[in-house]
Each structure stands twice: as structure tokens, then as C-alpha cells.
Amino acid sequence: MAEEKSTSDSIGMSMKGGRTNNGFVQNEDTLERNSDPGSPEHSPQHDTVDVLGPAGPDLKDVRPYAGMPKEVLFLFSGQARYRVPREVLFWLTVASVLVLIGATIAIIAISPNCLDWWQAGPMYQIYPRSFKDSDKDGNGDLKGIQDKLDYIATLNVKTVWITSFYKSSLKDFRHAIEDFREIDPIFGTMEDFENLVAAIHDKGLKLIIDFIPNHTSDKHAWFQWSRTRTGKYTDYYIWHDCTHGNGTTTPPNNWLSVYGNSSWHFDGVRNQCYFHQFTKEQPDLNFRNPDVQEEIKEIIQFWLSKGVDGFSFDAVQFLLEAKHLRDEAQVNKTQTPDMVTHYSELYHDFTTTQVGMHDLIRSFRQTMDQYSREPGRYRFLGTEAHGESIAKTMMYYGLPFIQEANFPLNSYLSKLDTPSGNRVFEVITSWMENMPEGKWPNWMTGGPDNARLTSRLGEKYVNIMNMLIFTLPGTPITYYGEEIGMRNILATNLNETYDADTLLSKSPMQWDNSSNAGFSEGSHTWLPTSSDYHTVNVDVQKTQPRSALKLYQELSLLHANELLLSRGWFCYLRSDNHSVVYTRELDGTDRVLLMVLNFGELSQLNLKEMISNIPTRVRIKLSTNSAYKGHEIDTYAITLDKGEGLILEYKSKNLLHHQTAFRDRCFVSNRACYSSALNILYNSC
């Protein structure tokens, strides 16, 4: 009985200590008591472990308290009322983690590929000499582009594309490059370029630049060393023996320059002829020489290290020529060979798109891939293939398992010179039907070497062409000034002897109605401004609710925010000489966007005849005539004026691309489905 009482008192005293202090003081008191070996408290019966004994105390009426010794705590924790909830929570945690891991794996597995930056928004192409002059010398420059980045951002574009700014002569509009690693002084300095790159990235934009690898200027150091047979540069260009005497040259064969006459020119220093596909001041590089290939790759790396996000490779079909020197076949076999002087009079089977040319582009792609490993820094590669057939153009996309260009530049709409629904329809379907599965399209309405939209088609068709490229699947590409409807200037003379007509679309950007259209504060500009700049300029149009600029901004904003336009199916319904009608739709949604574009005269359409389940009345989401926006329209009788376009919206659960009748008329570039319940995209449609 005495032992039981002693044990009970010991436990009671311990509990009392727990109630009157925070547990830490209790531990300190215990240490103080234990420090006196002679004290009664130091006797074995007061040791906590001994008191508990092997059977432990009766804890039925005892509750956990602060400062409880761990031995007592273990006795409490082993009770079912504490152990069971703890185990339940543990296994719930394990199950939750497993569910989260499984859900993450499932979402990754079913999620479609994210659109990259070159897919997610429009590109804006700038001819730098004509965009904005910052130093009053009459020439646009890199600082001028930087000054106008706020304006570019208002267009909701994702990418700025700057054409050639390398150190070069005036020949062929700066395509005769003297140094691939230098900025031409007209445009500024390398520091200006680096500042521009940083400013573009600060705006959340990307930058791509032109690159012309096929040839250099005859003033390039490589050519000067090659003509004197200096070291490895001896074979950097294409040299062949030729007969030269009495002021005349007999070339090795009948190959012609793009600009006419023989593509061979005699060099008196080397006493041989060199090959040039363009002007004689632009000798072609010898890409069968591995040293040349390595030089070009190093130049690509140089600009990528400067922060450039991609390139547009120009004139790539000319990179290789046949090793042999056989004559190319005449188009008109009855024509006297000596009279064949125009490029179009020969079939260019030996000087364009030679075997191995695509291997070169793939090697460029591999070089750029080395700089694409950093997240969010994928490097874009586009190719310009002027004049190629649609079948040859599609080859630049590469093979199913071998990446080449992200896309070849689609300039077919840029060459459209007659407003016609059938012609527009042919351009769209020829690209979509021939494009390899899973690849990404693009659409250009203009460029430095093509007449402007207003001059080709007429002022009434500017808005409808912009509406077209923003509602087709793929990346829209806009040449500077097309967003406000600039036109070609009148003929001018800069002593150019070739392709001078392309100067007409390179006139200064029209910013306002001040002197020189706000392009330059200098006394002169390198090209005259258009005579209509007082009314066709950015300042005027940004305050007009029905201007071309306002519609362009609305279209680009719709393109950025509308899943049906970025991810949806494209189904064409009808085309004739006047109109083009097509839809954009996405699995998982019950909305359909219907585009009705009229490229002809006043006409009337019955949409009920084309789509049986379309409602009788549909809403106008956007129109080239802003007064109609938000209105409803009868689908059995839609009247469209010349150059008028409508984006209509209606609900339907029976999407066209699921219907057998439309299956061959529907295309998708990057397939995805939408879950409204989870608000996510997935690919298991």
C-alpha cells in the first residue's frame, strides 16, 4: 500500500507541475533536483521511468498536458482514439499525393502541345530604312524602331521582323552584304541594335531578322581574298575558266541571272569567271565548301548570342548549283540561244533546289536548336522561296522526323493583283491541302518586294484582307503600313537598274500629317512620302472608330483571345467570283465563327442553303463596317457590299467537321478539344 501511494503521489506531483508551468521550467527543476544526489527526490522511487513500471499507470481519467514526458505521451498515442485518426490522416495524405501525381501525368498526357510564340500571334515586318528616322538624316534607323515600340505593342503583335540591316552597298536594296557581323552605319551601331533587342524583349515581344546566306557583296573581305587565291578562301565562291577577249566574255554555259543576262562575270584579278544568281556585285558563295558552311553557322551563332529570336532565310533555293556545267533547257526551244537573256526563258533545273540544299537548311536548324534549349527561348526559322511551286514550297517544312523550317513564308496572297473570291479560295486551299500534317500555316498580304494592298486591289479591300489573315488558321504576317492602308508612291529614280518597281512599296511610314508624314525631321527623306499622308496616317486613324487601324487592332485582339481562331478547325463552305465563306470551330464548344467575305460587287448570300442547322438569325461579332458590330442578321438573305466582310457567331452542337459532307473540306493545324467543365484543352478528342 505504501508503494502504491508513493507511486500515485509521484504521478500526481508530476501532473501538478505540468499544470503550473510550461513544461520547460519543469525540466529545469528536475535537473536542479537531480543535481543533489543526497536529496530524497534522488531516490529510485521518484524516478519517472521506475514509477511507470512495466505495466504503466492507469490513465483512464488523465488527459494530455503540456510538458508531458515522452514515455507518458507514448502511452497516450498508442490508444485507439489517437492512433486511428493518425493512421487515417496518413493514408489520406498518401492517397492524395498519388491522385495528384496521377492527375498531373494524365493532364500532361492528354494536353495538346502549347502554341509557341511564333504561332501565338501576328508578325510585323519592318523595312528599317523606311520606318522611323531618329537622327534627321532622312533614313530610318534602329533607334527609330525602338522609339515606336509602344505603337507596335498596340497592334497586339507578338513578333517584330526586321529586314536586312547589315553593312552593305545600295545594290539590290541592301542584299549585297559586305560584313554579316556589322550594322550598316545608316541604321546605327551595334550598341543601338543591342538596346533595341533589350527593348523589344522588355515589351514581351520577339525579334526575327533577315539573313541572306546565298551571296555576299563583291566588296566583302572573303571575295577579295578569294579572287587573289588566299588560303582557304580560294574556293569560297564559284569560279570557272571562261574565254575573255576584246571586251567580250564567253561564259561556261547559258545560266542566267535573275535580273537577266549571263550569271557569269569575268574577274581580271583571278582571270576566271565567277557565278552570280543576282547582280554581278553579288557573287554566290560556294556552299559545297565545308568552310563556307561553317562560316555561315558561326554568323548564325553570333546573332543568336545577341538575343535574336529567329531568322527569315532569304533566297534559299539558290544555295546550291549543279556540279556539272550543262546548259539549262529553253522554255521555247525554237528561240535562238543567243537571244535567250531573260530569266523566265529557261527552266532552272540546275541552279535552284538542288539535291543537298535541304540538308543545308536542316544544318542551320540544328545550329539554332543549340540555342533553343532554354525554356521560352525557342529560335524560329522561316524560309523565303520566291517563285517555287506549291509542292516544292512544302518541302521546306521538312520530313516527319526531321525538322527544317517552322514554316516557309506564304507570299501567295501578296501577289494577288485582282480581287476575286475564287483566287483567294485557291490560295487558301492550295496551301491547306498540300501542307504536311501537323505543320503550321502562315499568311502574308504584302512585303518589300510586292506592291501594297491598296495599290494592288484597291482601298476597299484593305480591311477584308486583314480580316482574312486574322481568321485563317496560322500566323498572320503584316508588312508595315498595311494596317493603315498605305499605298505605293509614284515612280521614282534612284539610278537603280533592276527591279526598281519594288521601291514603290518601301516609302516612309506615315505617322501623322506633319512634314515628311512624321517619319523624319530632316530636310529630305531617302524616298518621298505618299501624297495621301495627310489623311492616311496613324494619328488620324487611331481616333477614327471606323478606320483601318481600329479594325486591325480589333482583329488582332480577337485573334489573341479566341480559341476558335488559334486552335479551331477551318471548314470552307463556298467560293465564287465574289465571296468566300468558311467557319472556325472547336470540339468541346457549341460556338461557331462564320466568316463571310465579299471580294466582288454587291451580292446576296443565303447561308441557310450552305448550313442546314444554322439559326435564322445570328450575331455579328465583327464587321469591316463597325456600325454593324453586335447586330443580328437574317441568315437566309445576307447582303454584302463590295469589299465587305463579316464575322458571325452562332451556337451549334453539330459541328461541320464531324459531318460527312464537309469532312474533305475541313483542316486543322494543331488539333485540340476544349473541356468547359475543367476549362482546359486536351487532345484525346
Image: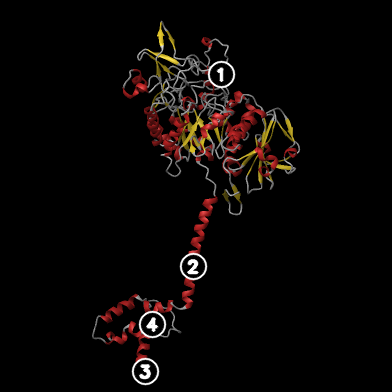
Residue 15: image tag: 4
The label nearer to you, 3 versus 1, is 3
What's the CA distance linking mark 3 and mark 2?
Answer: 46 Å
Disc 2 residue type?
Trp
Asked whether the beta carbons under mark 1 and mark 4 sit within 8 Å of each other, the answer is: no
Instruction: Report if residue 624 is visible in the image.
Output: yes
User: Residues at badges 4 and 3 in contact (C-beta under 8 Å)?
Assistant: no
Say whether disc 3 or disc 1 marks the residue closer to the N-terminus: 3
**SS type, badge 4:** helix
- Determine the CA span between mark 3 and mark 1: 122 Å
Between discs 1 and 2, the one toward the N terminus? 2
Residue 403 in picture, x, y percent from top left: 48, 37
Residue depicted at x 41% and y 79%: 75
Q: Quadrant of residue 569?
A: top right
| Camera-nearest residue between 503 and 141 | 503
Please give the residue where the numbered disc 1 appears in the rendered image. Answer: 490
Element carrying mark 1: loop
In this view, the mark in front (3 or 2): 2
Identify the mark nearer the N-term, 1 or 4. Answer: 4
Which residue was labeled with disc 2? 91
